[in-house]
Every structure is written in structure tokens, then in C-alpha cells.
Image: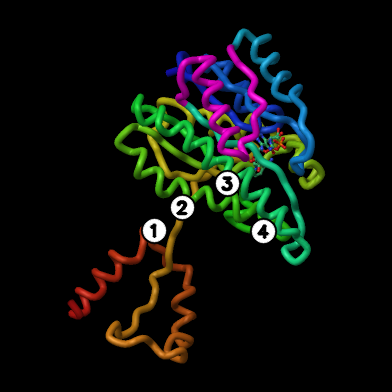
Amino acid sequence: MTIRFDNRVAIITGAGGGLGRSHALLLASRGAKVVVNDPGGSVDGKGGDSSAADKVVAEIKAAGGQAVASYDSVATWAGAQNIISTAVKSFGTVDILVNNAGILRDKSFIKMPIEDFELVMQVHFMGTVYCTKAAWPIMTEKKYGRIVLTSSGSGLNGNFGQSNYGAAKTAMAGFQNCLKHEGEKNNIKINIISPAADTRMTGGLMDDTALKYMKPEHVSTAVAWLSSEECNVSGQIIAAAAGFYAALRYYRTEGVSFNPSQPATLEEFASETGNLFDFNHLTEFNGVSKRVQEMLKAKGYT
Ligand code: NAI
């Protein structure tokens, strides 16, 4: 079975280089009509250059594909609305949205100007919210949509000097955990990619021996599958790098429980922290309310 995107319209934000360019080229090579969105600019979000998006559009066209450039920033509601209308005006609809745009403003938290925290949240997280919000009514009406959000190990796992970036990237998880429910009845599937690849954003950060394998194209394979009709999952997180793919999910420890009629003392609580943090026995986390109700019933409290 060949996976194709004929008659599908895809928007890739931040597609003027790096991972976004690679996603755009792959989708276009398999028949998608692609909006290549990128205002250009430096890794820290300064300046702008329409040639970034133009070059990728030219590459797609030279290979026989269909694409149009968009230079709007995802970081404003008006910009995001323009990106989605570019797809509608050029190709009639939107089926696929890959939220990929991003910048860095790394600094230890103590030295980070609050404006840098806000800007990174605005581009990564609010940019994702704005684009998704603008595309959502179209996907709802047509009862079809594939949305990919871009997270990062820097947030899911944490990294020194990236509290702004890590916060924005992990906010994607909460966003999709709720939207997967809201999109379910209309066949809108929303998933996260957590990539690692050699791009200008990671330039110089990776070990030279690994670098030659860290091609953005490896990540694009997973992104394209998540963007396809064949994608049968929603609310999942795929970590992807150098041909390795793994799915991530939340698990909780067995937990500890005290008499629910009165709060445990601090000392009683402290005496159980060994069990509380015993990660040798894990259960999938799907909220604690149900588990607590079962426990209360089992112990005869209800
Ligand atoms: P990149 O810097 O090559 O790509 C980011 C693109 O986003 C740039 O072309 C930039 O012009 C564009 N962009 C910046 N602000 C924008 C805005 N306001 N509106 C629209 N576009 C904007 O870097 P890379 O590595 O390709 O990053 C792509 C995504 O993957 C980012 O979200 C990044 O945080 C994420 N990521 C990358 C990792 C890696 O190993 N390369 C690791 C984890 C996450």
C-alpha cells in the first residue's frame, strides 16, 4: 500500500528550512498541495526574509509538486488566520496542519528577561494554538483533519537554560490531551512529534559522530504518517531521531493511601515517600479520580 496525499492540502509552519522544509518536501512529493509558511529570520526570531519560504516552494515546484508561500508569523492571531486563508484561497481547504515554527531564546532562568520567556511561549505555544484554532472549524465541518504539534525533549525531559522553550513545548501535551477528545467525533486526529535532528537550531550542539545520521528526513517520515489518512491514533507523542522512533505516555506509581476521613500528618506522609516515588511498579496514568473512587469502595469508605 502506498501512502499518498493526493487532493490533500497541508500547511507546514516554519517550513523555510530545517525540519519544516523536510516535512513540506515529503508531503508534496506524495501529492499534497502545500502551504510553505515562513517569515524567515534568525534562530532567535529576529528579522525576516521571504526568500526562505520562496526557495522551498521553488524546490517543490521543480520536483513537479504544488506549493504556495506564506510569510505570516504564527505568533499573532491575525497572522495565523492569514496562513489558514492562504490555504483556502490557493487550494480550497485545509486537511493537514503541521505546527512546526519555532525560535530559541536560551538563558538560565535567573538571567532570562521576561520578554524572552513571553516571546518563546508566543511563537511556539500560542502560534500553535492560533493556527489550530483557525484551522479547526474547517476540519470540523469537513469531518477530517490531521494536526501535528512539535514538542521537544527539552520540555518533556527538561534542559538547563530552556525554561521558556521547555514550558512552551510541554504545553503542547496538555493542549492535545484535550483536543483529542474534541476532535474525535469529526475524525480530527492530533498528535505530537518530539524530534531531534541536525538543523540550524541544534547547530553545534550534537556529537559529530551522531550528526551525520540526524537527518530531518527521519523525523519527516513519522510526521507524514501522522498527517496521513492511515494514521489511526490521536493524542500520542512520537519521539523521532536518526531512524529511531518511540511512543511516549504518562505512567504513575502504585501510590500510597491514608485514611481519607482526615488528612495525613506531614510525618505520616514523609514516612511513605519511598513508596510514593517507587517507579518500579507503574500503571498507565489516566487521572486519579477513578482510582480513588475504586480504592474508597474497596476499603469500605463508600
Ligand atoms: P529551524 O530554525 O531550522 O526551523 C524553525 C523555522 O521556524 C525557521 O525556518 C523559522 O524561520 C520559522 N519561524 C520562526 N518564527 C516563526 C514564526 N513566528 N512564524 C512562522 N515561522 C517561524 O529549526 P528546526 O530544528 O527545523 O525546528 C523546527 C521545530 O522543531 C521547532 O519547533 C523546534 O523547536 C523543534 N525541535 C527541533 C529539534 C531539533 O533537534 N532540531 C529538537 C526538538 C524540537
Q: Residue at x 31, y 66 (%)?
A: 289
Which residues, given as a range, are shown in magenta?
Answer: 66-95
According to the image, label 2 marks what residue? 249
Position of residue 61 in the picture relative to residue 206 (left or right):
left
Residue 237 can be seen, yes or no: yes
Mark 4 CB near ligand 1 (8 Å cut): no
Q: CA distance from mark 1 to mark 4?
A: 27 Å
Residue 125, disc: 3
According to the image, label 1 marks what residue? 284
Amino acid type at mark 4? Ser
Amino acid type at mark 1? Glu
Q: CA distance from mark 2 to mark 4?
A: 22 Å
Mark 1 or mark 4: which is in front?
4
Residue 91 lies, with reference to residue 140, above or below; the image says: above
According to the image, label 4 marks what residue? 163
Secondary structure beneath dot 4 equals helix
Q: Is-magenta flag for residue 68? A: yes
Badge 3 density bin: few <14, some 14–19, many ≥20, Cα 10 Å: many
